[in-house]
Amino acid sequence: MVGFGGGWSIINLLEKEFVETSKWLSEEEFSRLVAIAASTPGPIALNVATYIGYKVAGVLGSIIATFSVSLPPYIVVLLIALLQPPSNR
């Protein structure tokens, strides 16, 4: 699953996947989750993914979900930084 446009844009993708397809959460539970995730510090997509991981597979699930959301952008930024030519200051 890939989403572009920031944390709020991935919320619809997560809802379709975990409410409609997998049925791991009810629509009401997902709505409450988004409200809580929006009011806590940090990126909303990360907060939502961490909670869903916890709900589905406990602490290990939350750790895996957190890394699954955090690692791809980190790798992209790292690759861009490594591919930049050195600065000649």
Image (cartoon, helix red, strand yellow):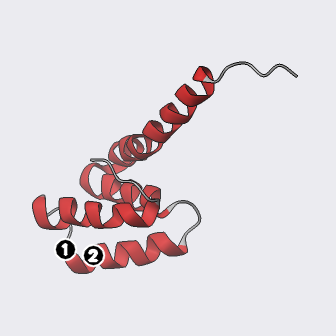
| Spatial CA span between label 2 and label 1 | 5 Å
Which quarter of the picture shows residue 24? bottom left
Callout 2 secondary element: helix
Instruction: Categorize mark 1 by other alpha carbons within 10 Å: few (<14), some (14-19), many (20+).
Output: few
Circle 2 residue: 29
Placement of 18 over or under 65, stated as above or below = below
Dot 2 amino acid type: Glu
Placement of 29 over or under 14, stated as above or below = below
Placement of 41 over or under 28, stated as above or below = above
Circle 1 residue: 26
- Give how far across and how far down residue 7 sits, in percent: 45, 61
Q: Tell whether 46 sits left or right of 58.
A: right
Callout 1 secondary element: loop
- Give how far across and how far down residue 33 sits, in percent: 36, 72
The residue that appears at 21% across and 77% down in the rendered structure is 27
- Give how far across and how far down residue 72 sits, in percent: 43, 38
- The outermost residue toward the right is 89
* For the residues bearing labels 2 and 1, Cβ distance under 8 angstroms: yes
